Image (spheres, rainbow, N blue to C red):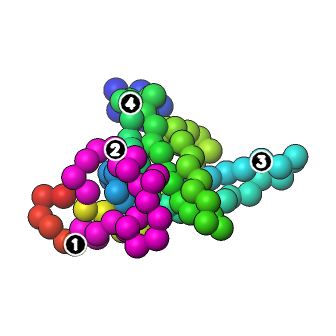
Amino acid sequence: MQDIINEVNPKSDLPVFNSGDTIAVHYKIKEGSKERVQVFQGVVLQRRGDGSTETFTVRKMASGVGVERIFPYNSPLIDKIERLKRGRVRRSRIFFLRERKGKSARIKERYNRKNY
């Protein structure tokens, strides 16, 4: 039975992260016959869906322009995900960051707390 579950959900080794966390997503990109890994680092705006249709949105600032990317959680193209910081937010979807720039777009860090 466990083999069937692992076939359906192969990404059981990914870390636990929520909205407000800063993560680095190592994503495989195919260019012609070559394949390389690109790192997309930013803040998680939301997690959406459940099971095999779960996705998460990551936002980063590139040259003063906000870039958002939606990743399927169970994508075979995701090599690994690293959680760099735990953010302290009060909402599950933090779209208010889109209008903010500079210091007002910062998220407080959540430090070691039990039961997280």
Q: Are marks 4 and 3 in contact (CB under 8 Å)?
A: no
Between discs 3 and 2, the one toward the N terminus: 3
Q: Residue at x 34, y 57 (%)?
A: 20
- In the shown orientation, is residue 4 left or right of residue 64? left
Q: Nearer the viewer, residue 41 or 31?
A: 41
The residue labelled by disc 4 is 49
Q: Amino acid at mark 3?
A: Lys
Q: Are marks 3 and 2 in contact (CB under 8 Å)?
A: no
- In the shown orientation, is residue 21 left or right of residue 74? left
Q: Residues within 10 Å of mark 2 (few under 14, many from 20)?
A: some
Q: Amino acid at mark 1?
A: Tyr
The location of residue 17, given as percent across then percent down, is 34, 53
**SS under mark 4:** loop
Residue 110 visible, this orientation: yes
The location of residue 89, given as percent across then percent down, is 26, 57
Between discs 2 and 4, the one toward the N terminus: 4
**SS under mark 1:** loop
The location of residue 42, given as percent across then percent down, is 49, 61
Q: Which is more foreground, mark 1 or mark 3?
A: 1
Between discs 1 and 3, the one toward the N terminus: 3
Residue 111 circle label: 1
The residue labelled by disc 2 is 93
**SS under mark 2:** loop
Q: Residues within 10 Å of mark 4 (few under 14, many from 20)?
A: few
The residue labelled by disc 3 is 30
Between discs 4 and 3, the one toward the N terminus: 3
**SS under mark 3:** strand
Q: Which residues are magenta?
A: 89-110
Q: Residue at x 39, y 35 (%)?
A: 48
Q: Residue at x 38, y 41 (%)?
A: 47
Q: Residue at x 74, y 57 (%)?
A: 36
Q: CA distance from mark 3 to mark 2?
A: 31 Å
